Image (cartoon, rainbow, N blue to C red):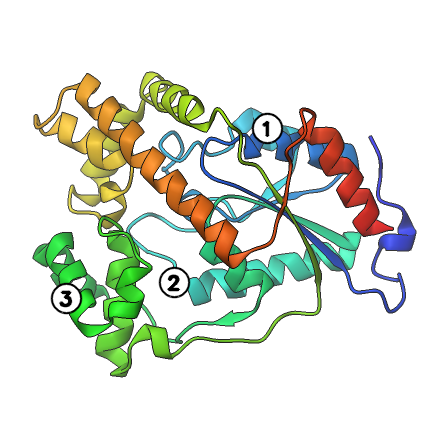
Amino acid sequence: MNQISPEFGPDAGAKAPLVVALVGPTASGKTALALELAEHFQLEILNIDSRQLYRGMDIGTAKPTAEQQQRVSHHLLDLRSPDQPITLQEFQQEAAAVVSQVLNKRGVAFLAGGSGLYLKALTQGLQPPAVPPQAELRRQLSALGQANCHQLLQQADPQAAAKIAPADAVRTQRALEVLYCSGKPMSEQQSANPPPWRVLELGLNPMELRSRIAQRTQQIYQDGLLEETRQLSQRYGPDLPMLQTIGYGEALEVLQGGLNEAQAIATTTRRTQQFAKRQRTWFRRQHSPHWLTGQDALSEAIRLIETGLG
């Protein structure tokens, strides 16, 4: 293990603190590599996966297991119940506070996850609209159905709709919520105020990603995705928007008799591969990560981090 030297801590002079972000599409191996890097440098891991923010959504989001969380301290997991969606602004505020605490203590913070918008909001200081959640409006939008909601968004704010997947009920509802409550499209309300950090982005994008996704999908069903979905549905109702996300949506259809498990696995695999393609496009257009292309991603990542610290 390599402990961060005090010269990189909070008293390191005028040099801006370093924030390391490990990003990449789903199933690319971020969790395993993040654990190795965190142990090597004796760091804590700050989650930037949007679905891992919610309690009870463990198997379907491939959340770090209890054993993995014992190996390395994690932050920004299980912040809310899934019937209380976290807005981008709320995440940004909470995550920025945690980053600041870690930087004051260690001089370096380590982020890991695949939600590019959440990373951009945090490291580039996006200032999303300060519109609080509207519970009644969200219930009405859920009753209206995601297809109708996304069509409404396309008509009212086509720029925002173009950035939100048609099946993404959470972000679609948020965009409509901002529009109806403020009278202005979300796409016209975002500005930026970058924090005083140096940011080192490391990216994973393995060649065998499609097969990794297929294996991951098989595994989450074997690990109990159907039972986890049943519990969430019983507790929060089958219309919960988070149950329309990848994996949970198909599992819910199995429980309701619309799909058999083999069909659900095939559909989840296809949706995940489509999502991974969108993630790769996002990171290519919105970020500039150092892609870990060598055979030994760990050694390459360690070298880049040590260079950034130096």
Tag 1 secondary structure = helix
Report the amino acid beneath label 1: Ala
Choose mark 2 or mark 3, whichever is in front. Answer: 3
Q: Position of residue 139 (x, y in %)?
A: 16, 60
Residue, disc 3:
152
Report the amino acid beneath label 3: Leu
Residue, disc 2:
87
Q: Position of residue 287 (x, y in %)?
A: 56, 56
Q: Residue at x 75, y 52 (%)?
A: 108
Tag 2 secondary structure = loop
Q: Are marks 2 and 3 in contact (CB under 8 Å)?
A: no
Q: Residue at x 12, y 62 (%)?
A: 140
Q: Which mark is drawn over residue 32? A: 1
Q: Is residue 122 left or right of residue 156?
A: right
Q: Which tag, 1 or 2, sits closer to the chain's start?
A: 1
Q: Position of residue 198 (x, y in %)?
A: 72, 61
